Image (cartoon, helix red, strand yellow):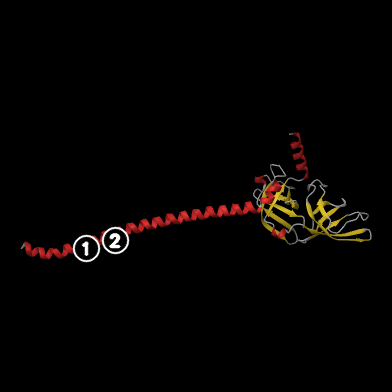
Amino acid sequence: MESFSSYIVYPFLVVQNIFTDRLKIWSEHRTSYNDLTKELLHRKQQYEDLQKELIQVRSFCNYFENTKDLRSFFERYNHPHAQITSILLKNFDQSHFFIIDKGSSAGIEKNMIAVYKDCLVGRIIEVYPLYSKVVLITDPLSKVASFCSTNGVKGIFEGTGQIKNAVLSYVNPLDEVKQGDIVLSSGEGLIFPRGFGVGKVVHSEKKGIHYSIKIELFLNFTTLDYCTIIPHYTQLIECEKKQGQH
């Protein structure tokens, strides 16, 4: 009887063994799959972290390279509020202005001056906590007291709403303005510091008692990505006095 029963029980034992083995294999595969999934997610996170670091490094290297000349220029102005800023937005419609990425929280103040290397860009007219508005010297309402570098002839540089050209007005008709002469800021008016470039004379013609003087700008404002913000004339004078005392 026991022998006969063994024949009946045997197939069940075989099936149970097979099922148990299959279940064990499935469980092992499932554990292995879960481990692989966790490892994959971990590797993916590592990849994303490394990619983020790479982007930051590349971005810093690009910023460092593109602002090398600006940083060299910046060293000339040892003032706590002078700093390099990125240009976030450009407008060349009826009014010409930049929006830069620094505001009052970074020490930016109204009437500070925006420059690029040794050339004028414009003046801060609006300041917010995180950004500021710079009116460009190309704006139709922009005026800069200037002089011709060759013979010191004085005039007022005026924006005309054009990207590449401006005019020099209020020049004494008895003075001589030569084509090709470099026009610099004179520092009069106590806003724009003296000695920054604005452009060169490309056309000079006397019309009776008036001059018609066309200025070609040094900077291409459409391609600028960065500019340096420095104190206005009065702040620079105060800074120089303090440095002289030390």
In the rendered image, the quadrant that contains the C terminus is: top right
- The residue located at (45%, 57%) in the rendering is 44
Looking at the image, residue 10 sits to the left or right of residue 237; the answer is left
* Viewer can see residue 160: no
Say which element carries label 2. helix
Residue type pointed to by label 1: Ile
User: Viewer-proximal residue, 80 or 73?
Assistant: 73
Residue 90 drawn above or below residue 84 = below
Residue type pointed to by label 2: Trp
Looking at the image, residue 8 sits to the left or right of residue 158; the answer is left
Q: Which residue is mark 2?
A: 26
In the rendered image, the quadrant that contains the N terminus is: bottom left
Say which element carries label 1. helix
Which image quarter: residue 91?
bottom right
User: Viewer-proximal residue, 181 or 59?
Assistant: 181
* Viewer can see residue 34: yes
- The residue located at (69%, 51%) in the rendering is 69
Q: Which residue is mark 1?
A: 18
Looking at the image, residue 34 sits to the left or right of residue 14; the answer is right
